């Protein structure tokens, strides 16, 4: 049953990714990536309680898929297809994925540390998550200076 | 300057938020590890996003005037104070000008760097242009935020219409008093043989025709035609045009006007221009190269300006239509005001010839039977209008642009050969 659910989530994620690529639809790509992440969440929730050591690889892979997907649906401009621009972009994406894997590894290692914080630590985590999203939203909405 | 978030920014924000919330709900830190890279990309990308800044930009064209179909070299000199990683530069061109080099271009500029960019621009359509509108666009490394700004370094460019080569021009019925290349009917000092007549006291001895004198036994003199110029007015109808996509009757009229003006001025005739339409312009007749460029510049301003105000020839000053001038009208004969004005010209005694820039190719018939019938009626109305002109002795020739303009002029000449001016 769990296997079927995981298969369904994964297939749905891939289908939405294909739809996003075919119709150059950003929301479909986001939904596809989210469904692939949801598949991982269900697998973790129904699996063993110990930290999954393969998480950094999944994180790097997910970011790689996302970067390539959004790159594919960008408008076709002749200047962006020049060899130098393509190589530069590839190096940026590769570097980002490597750093993503390392960051995920740090998070996983930190999660594996024997800390007992109780409700207080959980509240700190909630606040940190909310603050992270809030910072991103604030930076994105920074006013334009002429 | 505008700053726009791409859809990717919203998507990554949603994914990062969902991952963090899911980590809290499910209680698995791995989900936070999956969300962390998306959040990190957002923070890094947004922090590195900055608007493009240029210290200086100079735009120049290698010339200000050229003929339709020609190319002009443009140079843009950029200077930056701070490095720019990835800058897209677009030369915003008006319709009718096409860049042969890649446009937009991607640039990377370092500290205090000067960069010279060359553009080859092909001018496909006549007209007056102001080039030099640029758009700068920069994105952060991850394509989350797009900064776009524009700057202008206006440089004027005049593209003159290409005319056809004409072998023979229409000649007016009467010439003017100044020297030119025309042979009038009148007799005077010249080199073109006119007639022989007996010598009368006062004739110059160099005029004596010795061969005729020897044959007849008494002095005979040669009479010649003087070389005179003529006045020509090109009458451009700009009330209405028929147009399909990139070409219309106004383009054909402008091209024909440029050909006629160029050739008549080469023959030392005086040429004037009347652009009669929603906006009425005129140039009094004159000769020379200066007049040629004056008229071509005026032609560039010709455009269809929709107006319902009634206009007639009383708007024009007398000098715009010199007496005894040949008026060559280039008109699609679509607007009643233009039709009546041309009839008025004929009534005032002007030597008028109408080259009808046919709108028929630009108005194809519709698919239905009613459309076909309406089109046949329209064609018959146009035929009746032409007959009206012909009855008044005005040659009207339908020209579609597919045949040479010379053919239309020959048809006018054939009509005038068989027609005579009736003075009543």
Image (cartoon, coloured by chain):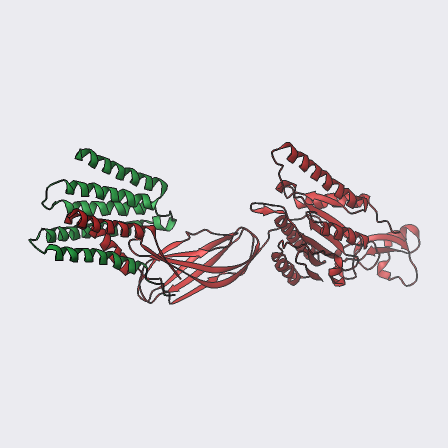
Chain colours: A green, B red
Locate residue B269, reporting x and y percent: 72, 58
- When the figure is inspected, residue B355 is found, relative to residue A14, above or below; the finding is below
Residue at 84% of width from left, 57% of height from top?
B187
Image spot of residue A48 (x, y percent): 10, 41
Residue B67 horizontal/vertical position (percent): 57, 54
Instruction: Please give the count of numbered marks on the rendered protein.
Output: 0
Q: Residue B314 occupies which quadrant of the picture? A: bottom right
In-front residue for pair B255/B344: B344
Which residue extends farthest left? A114
In this view, the residue in front, B148 or A140, is: A140
Q: Residue furthest front?
A: A119
Q: Is residue B230 visible in the rendered structure shown here?
A: no
Q: Specify whether B359 is left or right of B136.
A: right
**Location of residue B183 (image quadrant):** bottom right
What residue is at 34 percent from the left and 52 percent from the top?
B6
User: Where residue B127 appears, x then y in whole percent?
Assistant: 57, 55
Q: If the image is split into quadrants, where does the N terminus of chain B sit?
A: bottom left
Relative side of B67 to B340, left or right:
left
Q: Which of A140 and A5 is in front in this view?
A: A5
Residue B397 is left or right of residue B105, and the answer is right
Evaluate whether residue B422 shows in this view.
yes
Which quadrant of the structure image shows residue B292? bottom right
């Amino acid at each position: 049953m769990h296997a079927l659910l995981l298969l369904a989530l994964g297939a749905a994620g891939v289908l939405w990714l294909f739809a996003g690529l075919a119709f150059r639809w950003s929301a479909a790509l986001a939904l596809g990536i989210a469904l692939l992440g949801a598949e991982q969440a269900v697998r973790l929730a129904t699996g063993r309680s110990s930290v999954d050591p393969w998480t950094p690889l999944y994180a790097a892979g997910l970011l790689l898929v996302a970067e390539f997907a959004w790159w594919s649906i960008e408008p076709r401009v002749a200047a962006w297809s020049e060899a130098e621009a393509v190589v530069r972009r590839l190096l940026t994406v590769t570097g980002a994925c490597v750093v993503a894997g390392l960051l995920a590894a740090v998070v996983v290692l930190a999660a594996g540390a024997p800390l007992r914080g109780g409700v207080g630590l959980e509240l700190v985590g909630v606040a940190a998550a909310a603050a992270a999203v809030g910072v991103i939203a604030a930076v994105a909405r920074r006013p334009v200076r002429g | 300057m505008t700053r726009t978030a791409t859809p990717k920014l919203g998507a990554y924000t949603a994914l990062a938020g969902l991952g963090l919330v899911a980590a809290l709900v499910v209680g698995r830190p791995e989900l936070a590890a999956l969300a962390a890279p998306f959040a990190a990309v957002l923070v890094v990308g947004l922090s590195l996003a900055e608007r493009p800044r240029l210290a200086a930009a100079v735009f120049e064209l290698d010339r200000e005037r050229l003929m339709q179909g020609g190319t002009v070299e443009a140079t843009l000199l950029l200077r930056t104070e701070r490095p720019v990683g990835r800058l897209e530069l677009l030369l915003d061109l008006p319709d009718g000008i096409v860049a042969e080099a890649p446009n937009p271009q991607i640039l990377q500029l370092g500290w205090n760097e000067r960069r010279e960019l060359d553009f080859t621009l092909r001018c496909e359509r006549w007209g007056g242009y102001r080039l030099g509108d640029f758009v700068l666009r920069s994105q952060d490394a991850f394509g989350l935020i797009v900064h776009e700004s524009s700057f202008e370094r206006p440089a004027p460019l005049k593209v003159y219409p290409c005319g056809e080569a004409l072998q023979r021009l229409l000649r007016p019925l009467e010439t003017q008093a100044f020297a030119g290349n025309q042979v009038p009917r009148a007799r005077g000092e010249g080199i073109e043989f006119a007639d022989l007549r007996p010598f009368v006291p006062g004739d110059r001895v160099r005029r004596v025709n010795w061969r005729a004198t020897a044959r007849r036994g008494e002095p005979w003199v040669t009479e010649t035609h003087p070389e005179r110029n003529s006045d020509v007015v090109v009458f451009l109808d700009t009330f209405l045009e028929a147009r399909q996509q990139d070409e219309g009757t106004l383009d054909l009229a402008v091209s024909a006007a440029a050909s006629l003006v160029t050739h008549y001025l080469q023959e030392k005739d005086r040429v004037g221009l009347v652009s009669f339409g929603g906006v009425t312009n005129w140039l009094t007749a004159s000769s020379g190269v200066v007049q040629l460029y004056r008229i071509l510049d005026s032609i560039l301003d010709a455009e269809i300006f929709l107006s319902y105000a009634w206009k007639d020839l009383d708007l024009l000053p007398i000098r715009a239509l010199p007496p005894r001038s040949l008026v060559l009208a280039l008109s699609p004969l679509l607007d009643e005001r233009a039709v009546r004005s041309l009839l008025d010209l004929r009534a005032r005694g002007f030597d008028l010839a109408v080259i009808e820039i046919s709108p028929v190719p630009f108005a194809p018939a519709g698919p239905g039977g009613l459309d076909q019938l309406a089109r046949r009626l329209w064609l018959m109305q146009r035929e009746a209008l032409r007959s009206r002109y012909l009855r008044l002795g005005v040659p009207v020739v339908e020209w579609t642009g597919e045949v040479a303009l010379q053919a239309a002029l020959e048809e006018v000449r054939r009509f005038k050969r068989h027609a005579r001016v009736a003075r009543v």
